[in-house]
Image (cartoon, helix red, strand yellow):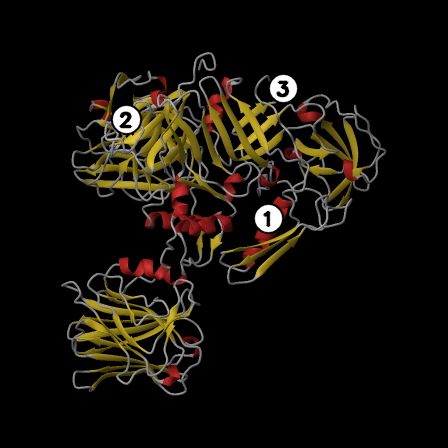
Amino acid sequence: MAFPDDPLETSVSVLVDGEWEEVAAEVYTRSPISIERGRPNEATVVNPSKGTLVFNNRSGDWSPRNPRSPRFGKIGRNTPLRIAVPGTVPYLALTGDPADTAATPNHASLNMTGDLDLRVEVSGDLYGTATTRNLIGKLDGTGGPTYLLQISTVGTLRLRWATGPAVYDSFTLPLPGGLPRRVALRAALDVDDGAGGYLVRMYWAPSLAGPWTRFGEEFAPGVGTTTVYPSAEPLLIAPSTPTSSTPGVPFAGRIYGAEVRNASGTVVAAPDFTTQALGSTSFVDSTGKTWTLNGTAEITNRRFRLHGEVPSWSPSWDVSGKDIETPVEVAGIMRRLLQGDKALDSALRRSVPTSQGIVAYWPMEEQAGATQAYSPMAGVKPMKVTGLTFAAVDTLPSSAPLPTLKAPSSILATAPAPPAGSLGWSVTWLYRLDQAPAVERTYMGITSSGTVRRWAFVFAASGSRVVGYDSDSNEVVNNAIGTGSDLFNQWVQVTFRARQSGGSVEWRIDWQDPGGDAGGFGTTYTGTAGRCTGVTSPSAGFHTDLDGMALGHIGIFSLYQPSAYVGAVTGYAPETALTRMARLASEESNLPLSWVDGNTTQDSEWMGPQRPGKLLDLVQEAADADGGLLYENRDALALIYRDRATFYNQTPGLVLNYAADGEVAPPLEPLDDDKDVRNDRTVSRLGGSSGHAVVKEGPLSVLAPPDGVGVYDDSVTLNVYADAQTERIAAWRAHLGTWDSARYPSVHVNLAAAPHLIDRVLDLDIGDLIRINNLPEWMPPGPVDLLVQGYAEVIDLYAWDIVFNCEPAGPWEVGVRDDAHRGRRNTAGSELAAAVDADDTTLSVTTTLGPQWVDAFVAYEFPLDVIVGGEVMTVTSITGTVQDTYARTLATGWGTATSGQAWTTSGGASADYSVQGA
């Protein structure tokens, strides 16, 4: 890139009539473009992304209500706008539209019937999606695959292939968590493993050049080889398979290259988009095959810096009326999501009406002044009620407040007919009664059209009973059931179901503590099951023994075994923070969300019940419980979540050399202050207990100065699942709040002065690690590692400045069991046993507390790094022990012969010269 000698070719595009229109030529260059993302400097919360620019509006084209403008009626509030800059590496840009593909015609070499190896290098959403996305493959002419590599739902890699006409086989493996944003994926099929079967193996690599790392177990299905059934269709990048047995949509993102190899390992197709001219629509790959781009697929080097919306347009002009401009402030999607005031319905209210077999449903979540209970389902009449006190009980986390009974209260609701062909029916409801009646009382009634016209459900302290009456009020069923005290003083979910079995009716009743114990009873009677026609109370109304009983979420189903309440009844607790976010994103079409880590069932914290709340608040609640970061995607109008585990032990995304001209622009100002110090932390579980962690020793402990800094306390309430989580989280937060290092709140990079950093800066995103090497001699030795929390960016014709907002990365360097470097355990205290000076390379050190340092015979432990008096040293050996005294040979200053640091001591205890494992 010639920048800054040539002007920076910034791209600004606006979505008009469903297509992106390039409008950079209409943006004033006299006003630079500015962009802000993530956490602003010194802030603790993520703000919506923001961009500012000014349109030249002398033509009137940027006045949305100007009928003379060609954009009249096509731009307005929340028109999508994106800002991009040129990178140095071309790629194939795909939007996910079925028309956007790269294709090469069918060729004999592409019709492998034997072993198959598919590889593709991509950058895009690998994990957070509710749809399967197709990367590369051949179709069979019916919408199914001849062979196809896909990223399946929730971050899995799938290989599919045809074994005959419209007959398919497949294998799927979860992608490893935390893969690079640009990554090569590979699946290899061995159709005959020599042992009467076939194998599938899957790999990932930093690029198509490798090295390849296999993940998961190889797929060996047992006896039987396989084959790949050929077709005459072209080979496609990002095909669409809408009619396949496993539908898939085209991949949206960047494709850098792909390879298809046959049984001998010979490359039979190899499109390399990184070597193609920008804007080209056709090229020949290294195997001689011609590739053609279709739809809006394009070869570009454009790298997006902001995807947003324009919430307002405000044309302005000078007094002459000749200088007319329209300044706009582009906002990320988070701004719009934060504007909404409507809370999502309760977990049960959201789940039950959309469940399979639902016929009628009454949540009973009305406000206090209600006189009936409505149904959210079309065609279902409201429930008639008397004597209910609505919104009286708020102890079921998966529900809004529910009503209680007060005798002689009553309920009456009718259900429409179920679909024809239903073979059974069921009714589910929830109740809570804290005191068991001394004598039997009916607490629910069901009406039906079968032999039994009225079912009565009875309980008492002594047990339960189910009674069924025919149309003449004769008893058809009367079964006593031995139940215990667990039907009282807690919420109970009841399901009654009936179905026809020849000339008999099978019926069963089940009680369950939501998320806990369950039990039931069932038997048969002679007759017909009919259908459920409604629910009712006893004819005289509920008895006074039931006063205060809470009741709600009555659902009627045309299924014998409904699953509508599974998960939802507990508010989906326990589920991980990532699982909750993924589920909410799949339920809400207005929440486009992806995540950095692929494993939704591990790593992130277990969540408590999902209570009613605003959509973004619920997502942020999960992020807060996990300790990760929710921010906006710059490649799409969407959100990204980065879970806590992805911050651990990172490889630097950007390495800056302070000594090199231009790599770190001034000012670089460390702060040794107490802004982020928190050494006494309390974490409470929402609706539960608390955990407490206090740092009692060390330079940032609660001890009075100079032994510590005094008490810095705080508290937070998190919606985690178990009380046991709170103490662990409090300890982690105390660790973060007492990391003893200087803060570097901002790092300034001037890309006009250091254009060689452009691609690495373009790859860097929120949460990534910056390392600064070769700080001046008046600073502590060793590199400074920082985590990017956000940044402010200014783009001009001949200027491009980025100021990264950072926090120390040190506390995120964590131990890893069985790891050669991070699996080492530190001593609890060491001190010099003899005086040293600046040119010594051997130190005599005594362990004063905790485990001893390893002896020299453990050769695999070396080298290891230690910090001595603020200096990082590399230990190459440890020899001899006399009363825990060790001689250490060290190469100081990160591998240099000498650090040049002039330090001396007479030995003995000294906090300044204590040794810590680095």
Q: Dot 3 surroundings within 10 Å: few (below 14), some, or many (20 or more)?
A: few
Q: Dot 2 surroundings within 10 Å: few (below 14), some, or many (20 or more)?
A: many
Q: Dot 1 surroundings within 10 Å: few (below 14), some, or many (20 or more)?
A: some
Location of residue 276 in the rendering, given as x and y in whole percent from the top left corner: 33, 17
Q: Residue furthest left?
A: 420
Q: Which residue is mark 2?
A: 297
Quadrant for residue 307, please give it.
Answer: top left
Q: Residue at x 36, y 37 (%)?
A: 312
Sequence-wise first label, 3 or 2: 2
Judge whether 438 appears above or below 358 on screen: below
Location of residue 368 in the rendering, given as x and y in whole percent from the top left corner: 37, 70
Do we see residue 158 in this rendering? yes
Q: Which residue is mark 1?
A: 732
Sequence-wise first label, 3 or 1: 3
Quadrant for residue 805, please give it.
Answer: top right
Q: Residue furthest front?
A: 319
Q: Residue furthest right?
A: 906
Of 285 and 417, nearer the camera is 417
Location of residue 824 in the rendering, given as x and y in whole percent from the top left corner: 64, 40
SS of the residue at dot 1? helix
Location of residue 511 in the rendering, given as x and y in whole percent from the top left corner: 36, 72
Of 149 and 194, nearer the camera is 149
Q: Of circles 3 and 1, which is in front?
A: 3
SS of the residue at dot 3? loop
Q: Which residue is mark 3?
A: 659
Amino acid tagged 2: Ala
The answer to whether residue 146 is left or right of residue 437 is left
Quarter that holds the N terminus: top left
Amino acid tagged 1: Trp
**Separation of marks 1 and 2 at Cα, in angstroms:** 46 Å
Amino acid tagged 3: Ala
**Separation of marks 3 and 1 at Cα, in angstroms:** 35 Å
